[in-house]
Structure formats: structure tokens, C-alpha cells
């Protein structure tokens, strides 16, 4: 009786040992293969119109570490993304197309970082300017410099052509109109801020803080003496052949940029403060 019990115990021990070894020998699942998505991002087309590939932005439900996750499309292919500002938990930007009446679902998977993708790049290695490129086009913006004069550097220091060559820099900014009205007293400060670095979208802001005298037009006071501003923001997206340029100022301002020799293309932004 005792011998039978001992044999049974040994048999049970042997069975458990082999089961444990068999489990240890099974290959581990690849990270993220069967893992539940951290977040799903869904977009549906309701109007029967197909949309070409472009940057879309979704607010996130919870904060994510972009170094520890990757984004998969509805064919389980990894696609580039970046975390951007927007919403209490931040937002995610990536590129997608959307066929008519289709629904596309992208999955943000935690477990490992993303692959390296070509896309928008911000190159700050140059001495005098920052270069923003995406393989199709690009723009150069000035770095902070001194001394600052009443005709500071133009916000555009060059435009990249499709063949990879660059245009010359723009002429210095002039803060007056054709009647020589609108002169400034001085440029007090300059800041250049890289707000987003890609690979999906790059955003760079050039800002001048300015002091100007009172500006009148006949008996009309156009603006009082004191602080004024000039800000230009550049946005370049992955796969897009153009750069979005937005300028906000309360001064007359002009500069020229030669894109086709010998005739310059002149950019004029004129915005009076509506107070």
C-alpha cells in the first residue's frame, strides 16, 4: 500500500516536471502581437468623397510615451507618428488617406518604440539658419543673432526647390509703407522657437519684439507709441510640396525674396491693429 502510494506520488511529480519544462520550451510571443491596443483611433468618411493622404490629429484619451509605443494602420503596418500639443492628455499626429464611405482604424500599441521613418526634419546644425525639409521642399529661417537693427533679417532665409537647390535669402524687413510711414524705433528682441520637430510635422516660429513711435495718418491716430510685434510661423508636413507661412503683426512690413532670377517675388503683410 505504501509502495503504491510512493509510486503514484513519483509519477505525479514526474508529470508536473515535464509539463513545466514543456511550458518553458514554448517560444515567447512577439511583443505587441496579441497585446490589446493602448488606444484605437477611428475615422469614418460620411460624404462620399475620397481624401488624399494628409496629416490628421486625434486627441489622446491618456498620456503616452512616444518612445515606448508604435502606431499600426488597419493592415497592421507600422506608420510614423508624433505627439503634439492639444487636449488635456496631448494629441497624436500621423498621415493617412481616406477613401469615400470608408472607415479606417489605427491602433497605438505599447511595448516598444517606433521604427525610424523618413519625413520632416529640422536641422539646427547650421551657423546662421535653421533648415526645415521634407524631401520635396523646405525653408530656411534665421537663428537668433545680434546686434539687431531697425531692418532685421527676413523670416525666410531661403526656399528649397524640387531639385534640391536653394533660393537666396530674403531682403531685410522694412517696417514702413510706400509713403515712408510706419517707421519703428528699434527691435528689442528676437526669439526663434522650434515647436514641433517631425517626423510628421514641423513648426518653427520667428518673433521680433519691437518698439515704435506713434503712427498717424493725417489727423487720425492709427496706433499709439509703444510695444509692437512681428511673428512668422512656418509649418511643413510630411509628403506636402508646400510650406504654410503665417504672419501676425501690427505694423507695415515688407521684404523681397528672389525665387526666379532676375525678378523678385515680393511678400507684403499689412495688418493694422483693430483697437
Image: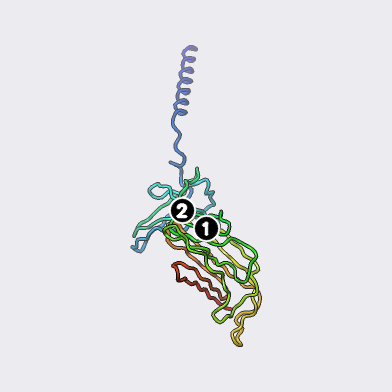
Residue 161 vs residue 168, the one in the foreground: 168
Quick one: SS at disc 1? strand
Mark 1 Cα shell of 10 Å, populated few (<14), some (14-19), many (≥20): many
Image coords of residue 18 (percent x, y): 45, 23
Q: Which mark is residue 212?
A: none
Image coords of residue 125 (percent x, y): 56, 53
Q: Which mark is residue 119?
A: 2
Image coords of residue 128 (percent x, y): 57, 59
Residue 20 vs residue 227, the one in the foreground: 227
Image coords of residue 2 (percent x, y): 50, 12
Residue 5 vs residue 57, the one in the foreground: 57
Which residue in the protein does label 1 denote? 131
Residue 60 vs residue 266, the one in the foreground: 266
* First of labels 1, 2 by sequence position: 2
Against 269, is 190 above or below? above
Quadrant, the C terminus: bottom right
Decide if residue 242 is on the left or right side of residue 183: left
Is label 1 or label 2 in front?
Answer: 1
Decide if residue 275 is on the left or right side of residue 108: right
Amino acid at each position: 500500500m505504501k509502495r503504491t502510494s510512493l509510486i503514484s506520488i513519483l509519477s505525479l511529480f514526474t508529470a508536473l516536471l515535464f509539463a513545466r519544462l514543456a511550458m518553458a520550451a514554448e517560444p515567447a510571443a512577439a511583443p505587441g502581437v496579441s497585446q490589446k491596443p493602448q488606444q484605437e483611433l477611428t475615422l469614418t468618411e460620411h460624404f462620399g468623397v475620397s481624401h488624399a493622404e494628409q496629416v490628421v490629429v486625434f486627441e489622446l484619451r491618456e498620456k503616452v510615451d512616444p518612445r515606448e509605443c508604435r502606431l499600426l494602420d488597419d493592415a497592421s503596418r507600422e506608420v510614423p507618428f508624433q505627439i503634439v500639443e492639444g487636449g488635456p492628455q496631448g494629441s497624436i499626429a500621423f498621415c493617412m488617406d481616406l477613401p469615400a464611405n470608408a472607415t479606417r482604424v489605427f491602433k497605438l500599441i505599447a511595448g516598444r518604440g517606433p521604427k525610424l521613418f523618413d519625413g520632416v526634419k529640422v536641422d539646427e546644425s547650421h551657423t546662421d539658419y535653421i533648415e526645415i525639409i521634407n524631401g520635396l521642399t523646405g525653408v530656411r529661417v534665421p537663428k537668433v543673432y545680434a546686434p539687431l537693427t531697425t531692418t532685421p533679417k527676413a523670416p525666410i532665409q531661403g526656399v528649397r526647390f524640387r531639385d534640391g537647390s536653394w533660393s537666396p535669402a530674403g531682403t531685410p524687413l522694412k517696417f514702413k509703407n510706400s509713403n515712408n510711414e510706419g517707421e519703428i524705433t528699434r527691435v528689442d528682441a528676437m526669439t526663434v522657437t522650434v515647436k514641433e520637430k517631425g517626423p510628421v510635422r514641423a513648426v518653427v516660429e520667428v518673433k521680433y519684439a519691437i518698439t515704435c513711435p506713434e503712427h498717424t495718418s493725417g489727423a487720425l491716430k492709427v496706433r499709439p507709441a509703444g510695444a509692437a510685434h512681428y511673428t512668422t510661423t512656418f509649418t511643413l508636413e510630411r509628403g506636402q510640396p508646400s510650406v504654410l507661412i503665417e504672419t501676425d503683426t501690427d505694423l507695415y512690413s515688407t521684404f523681397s525674396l528672389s525665387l526666379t532670377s532676375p525678378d523678385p517675388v515680393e511678400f507684403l503683410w499689412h495688418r493694422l491693429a483693430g483697437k
